[in-house]
Amino acid sequence: MMNSLLWEGYRWDTSVWDRLKTCGKPIVLYGMGLGAEKILQAFDAYGIHPSAVFASDGFVRGHSFHGFSVLDYETLCKKFSDCIVVISFASQRPEVLEQMKRVSEQFETVAPDVPVAGELLFTPALLESRRPKWEAAYSLLADDQSRFVFREVLQFKLTGRIEHLFRCATPRQKIWDLFPLRADEFLVDMGAYTGDTIKEFLEQNNFQCRKILALEPDSRSFRKLSLYAQVLRDKYGLDIQCENLGAWNQREQLMFQRQAGRNSALSQFTASGLEHRKVKEIPVEMDSLDHILEQEPLSPTLLKLDVEGAEEIALQGCRETILHCRPQLMVSGYHRSDDLFRLPLYLHSLNPNYRFYLRHHPYIPAWETNFYVV
């Protein structure tokens, strides 16, 4: 079907959904919540029917989910001698990843890829229909590790096999080997959350920088971010500017769907069919980085974007900044099924001299798969 170097050594003609539909085994969901809801939506589309639900010890507590009593792992093992376990939640916690490995050693285990934003599922048809774009993005990658990560992540997204992600994972602290940081860095953090990337950046750069501009649309996260920024100002005398804004391609107000943790997102980017969850929507101010920086005398040197599916639109709002300042970038590449080609191709169109590195950090599913652009 596909004959470039990108596709060699893997099978690309079947998907996790095909496997689940034809396996003939009981299918058991591991986990509850929004991820499980999205997987069940896909099950409905493919005619797949789960047989049970289980959760990690400590998360059961008499819960029920979609008519199933939630089992603990010991009860699951007694009930099923053979089944396919479908991981339906996300985690980067080492002890949880180890538990996933243990489950996969006892039962066939998959983690179907459902996009954080949008509804486009990863299938052989999606790969084939966009073949030239996958290959163009692959050709931009700067090193063997990036190309290996690209192939393994695509294979995971297609098959749901978690071993592909374990094989290509890199500790997050290793990313700083790619960036030659200086004492006069100007970091713009879009999707700053409570300041986790800022903390990591400052620790790597000996708490030196010229300026930090942090954008965070969620009001609760913004309050925590502001408190952390004040600590940094008081302790290190840093110039940190925090804005309760979302990164976009123009100035406007949009509706924001508040969820747990950092996964709050613009309402138009969430999957449909989940209306019964009654997630709270609030208005948020959005703006382009180009507009925000109009009166800024300093030039940004490093941009970070983790904006829950709005990365391409936010990058459009950074166009003039990228063209004129040529900053290095850290860009999340996992929120949408086609982000792995759309984002590098757009950035390459702005600056053909950029070098693209791709890394996946320990996480199931393929969250924290990011582009590092230098």
Image (cartoon, helix red, strand yellow):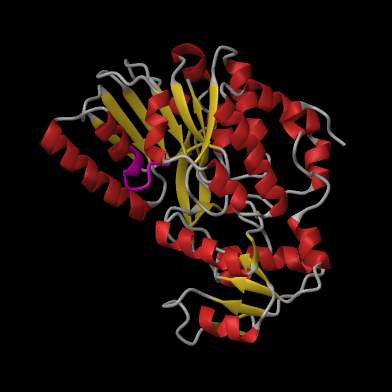
Is residue 107 visible in the rendered image? The answer is yes
Q: Is residue 53 above or below residue 259?
A: below
Q: In the picture provided, is 277 more to the left or to the right than 156?
A: left
Q: Is residue 194 magenta?
A: yes
Image point 63% across, 38% down: which residue?
339
Q: Is residue 199 above or below residue 49?
A: above
Image point 71% across, 24% down: which residue?
136
Count of numbered badges drawn on the protein: 0
Q: In this view, does 358 lie above or below 78?
A: above
Q: In the picture provided, is 229 more to the left or to the right than 168?
A: left
Is residue 64 visible in the rendered image? The answer is no
Q: Give the range drawn in magenta.
A: 191-197
Q: Within the image, what quadrant is residue 273 found in?
A: bottom right
Q: Is residue 67 magenta?
A: no
Q: Residue furthest right?
A: 1
Image point 67% across, 60% down: which residue?
272
**Percent x, y for residue 126?**
79, 43
Q: In the picture provided, is 205 more to the left or to the right than 87?
A: left
Q: Is residue 122 above or below residue 338?
A: below
**Percent x, y for residue 97?**
48, 58
| 195 vs 285, nearest the viewer | 195
| 355 vs 103, nearest the viewer | 103
Tell me the quarter of the image containing the N terminus: top right
**Percent x, y for residue 247?**
47, 37
Q: Within the image, what quadrant is residue 19 found in?
A: bottom right
Q: In the picture provided, is 143 more to the left or to the right than 23?
A: left
**Percent x, y for residue 82?**
69, 76
Q: Main secondary structure of the magenta part?
A: loop
